[in-house]
Amino acid sequence: MDQTPPILHGPSDKEKKYDRQLRLWAAEGQQALEDAHILLVNSGCGTVGVETLKNLVLPGIGHFTIADSATVNEADLGVNFFLDEDCLGKSRAECCVKLLLELNPDNDDIRKLLGSEKQYTLVIYSLPIDPADLALVKKYGEEHKVPLLSVHSAGFYSYFRLHLPGNFPIVDTHPESTSTTDLRLLKPWPELSKFADDLTNDIENLSAHEHGHVPYIALLLHYLRKWKESHGEYPSTYKDKKAFAAFVAAGARTDSPEGGEENYDEAVAAVLKTISTPTLPGALEEVFDYKPDEIEAGTTFWIIADAVKQFYMKHNELPLPGSVPDMKAQSTVYVKLQNLYKAKARQDVAEVDEMVRTHSKGREIDAVEVETFCKNAAFIKLIRASSTPMDLQKLSNSEFENEQFALSPSLLPIYLALDATSHTPYASSSDIIATIDKTIPEASSNTRIVQAAEEVARAKGGELQNISALTGGMVSQEVIKIITKQYIPINNTCIFDGIASRTQVLCL
Amino acid sequence: MSQPITVAPPTSSSRWTYLDQIRKVPGPFSEDHDNSEDALARLETMSVLVIGAGGLGCEILKDLALSGFKKIHVIDMDTIDVSNLNRQFLFRQADVGKSKAEVAARFVEKRVKGVSITPHNCKIQDKDEDFYMQFTAVVCGLDSIEARRWINATLVGMVDYPDNPESLKPLIDGGTEGFKGQSRVVIPTMTSCIECQLDMHAPRAAVPLCTLATIPRQPEHCIEWAHIMAWEQEKPFPKLDNDDPEHITWLYKKALARARDFNITGVTYSLTQGVVKNIIPAIASTNAIIAASCCNEAFKIATNSNPGLGLEDNYMMYSGNEGIYTYTFKHEQKDDCPVCGTIARNMEIDPNWTLQELIESMAARPEAQLKKPSISSGSKTLFFQSPESLMLKTRPNLEKRIGELLENGEEIAVSDPSLGSVDFKFRLRFSKPYAPAPKHGVTE
Ligand SMILES: [Zn+2]
């Protein structure tokens, strides 16, 4: 087996500093962050946006710009950690940039107001905002196809909303490692069958040591074959699988000092999870069913997606991911098994890659991208850009109707109350309710909407450090997910209730 | 129910305008809201303790200072490492090597006028009950489960209620891993405590030594082999220091050579470091979320400005991996909690085990997680780790079998230095009959 020995050197200074995050999003994610340029359009109390930036400056975002017309006053010092006494009376944007830059001198300093020719990766704006400014931001987002994130924090409540300029596909979704096992036990390819047969055809006569080290994949394939011989088909129902598990368990030898065999225990435990025909995951089905427009169709994601779809139509299965979970086995046998799965995975990738190359733009696509796509195929996620805004009246009906069945009350009233103050920092609860009433006629008789309106009015537009820090943390997680194209962002609005300590994500 | 709310633009001349507004005006959910001068002044006179000045601790200090707390103490024994700088925002490159508690305290004091922060550059175990008695609440941002268990047991043990209501100190605890985290509020003796919740944070199953020694299959197996076996055998340096790159490099090279022998791929320096130091990924965003959640609860408890976590819901789970998901619920107190419960916990055990095997299993049992347990039963001392004289006297018991030493249904008391003076009480339930025959063919 060929293996290039890794170079023996310790981590670089940068790897040392970013060690704890590189373990999450790796060098590619880090590069995307360092290439990004975030614009914060700040208004109102202005803490939540700065707290968001702090969490982006620390992991090394490339550039950031703050647009903020406010000058620093006393009250700012009581809620914004990135201002100090010396800032009083000065531009809030400039002071925050200065104290944020202190955090990570790897960042370049750029501060220009909106309207420059600069291409931002993403724009965050805080509410309440002047309607004229909002129009500018929205126009910029639309024209440059840039994601927008609005965030509103007041008193104990907050919400933020992600507006994507188009469909957002994610390949590297980081599924939980326990959910990714795909062993093809019901459809083994010839090499795998042969491998299992070689290990098990004389299973009765193996020495105790050999018998206790047959990897569970081979055991399951062996007992599946025997089961099919006597039952005519593979176990498919839950009841059958339970019976099959017992059948496997009965094959274990019990004369060992431990009274059993670990590999058989592993095999029995794996029955329910691995003995099933893989179905096409809903999220991937959505990708296959989607008809990309002309521009989309020429992008890497959709070219590969189309090739994988063809692969699936042809074989009725996805490309093999190729990883093998750890299991009791001799080292050499396990490595052989790993190589079997890897070889099959490579073969599948090669087939997809060939289809990719037939596309006029397919030649330019990096083979690594095809490989990554195939490996993650079952967990691909497409976030569809919302074309029409949700009918709030309809949504509130369903939210309040379902409430009696839900574990906890809907947080929609919080969104409604904050949204009613999108352009006015100080509103009374009756003003807020009157505004909500325009979209949801019975709002004034809904106790929970009234309470939310009162709680929002209570804050008088003031932010609380804790709520804004918490919200800024969540917003920065979303920004990182969007920039690195890893993990799965929200679709599309997250509401936070700092009294009950709950969040709810709604598509608005 | 609804409160009349007057509308007037806040006067921006006062620094605490926004906080004062929330503290002086009750909201629709406020209970026992008290806006008297006395009540408002209480926040300024009470002391809170922050445990840990790392990723969570830096955020907690900032959040508490900007929530109006004026007397804060912070305790942390660590010094600043370069890998802290991606999230511990009170530290700069030039601070590497200095005390975390001291640098963090000075920074926040300088930035937020009027707050006093007292640093303690030591272990929490170095402080006594008198020290902990001076605080109104404790906010914890730690990455060590042992330290959490110690402070939890200490705070529960200090409660003298209702005779001394001041002895009841809420413990607010946060923890993160990658994009996930949790925050929880413990009202000692009245709600579920850290020990009641221990099985929610089960340790990773250890790889059997025979796998490491003879049949490694994963890069981690090779690294653990280098860490546990090769190091012990060769002792390249007097004592393993996880933070010394030279030591990690030695382990990495050993693991790499072993991996090559077995055709195993994937051993890297980064993985070696991760396995040896048990590194948990950490980012600023998640620390911000969890720390602020903890401080929000501390603020609500201190001001009654709104109801919070505590007697009802007491635990918030957070995950940002797939969208955003939180689950907030009430974790029930356990009657058989060794720290805050009243009855002994059942422990199922094979009576044919030796006492040694029982002691070793204590580390892995999710409900115990004790690494250096000493064990006694009502009538006898079975095994003590210290003092040495007692250890030597009780050591012969390690080879004896459980059925020989104890009866089915008998209660044992287990203590561990990492938990202070707490005794774990377990009632033994034999899982099978005791067969007093020599084990594995050993003759007596
Ligand atoms: Zn307890």
Image: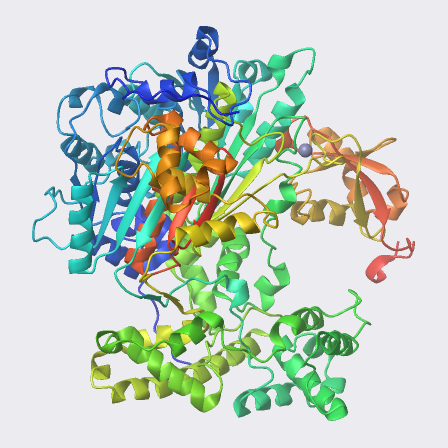
On screen, residue B47 versus residue B436, left or right, reads left
Q: Nearer the viewer, residue A182 or B120?
A: A182
In the rendered view, how is the structure colored?
Answer: rainbow
Q: Nearer the viewer, residue A434 or B284?
A: A434
Where is residue B370? Give x, y as percent. Answer: 66, 40
Q: Nearer the viewer, residue A338 or A357?
A: A357
| Count of marks overlaid on the render | 0
In the displayed structure, would residue A185 be above or below residue B23?
below
Q: Residue at x 13, y 42 (%)?
A: A109
On screen, residue A120 versus residue B65, left or right, reads left
Where is residue B240? Give x, y as percent. Answer: 47, 45
On screen, residue B218 versus residue A427, left or right, reads right
In the displayed structure, would residue A316 be above or below residue A104?
below
- Residue B236 visible (yes or no): no
Where is residue B367? Give x, y as percent. Answer: 69, 44
Residue at far top of view: B38
**Image quadrant, ligand 1:** top right
Q: Residue at x 60, y 33 (%)?
A: B149
In the displayed structure, would residue A286 be above or below residue A96?
below
Where is residue B235? Give x, y as percent. Answer: 49, 50
| Residue A133 position by quadrant | top left
- Residue A395 visible (yes or no): yes
Residue at far left of view: A117
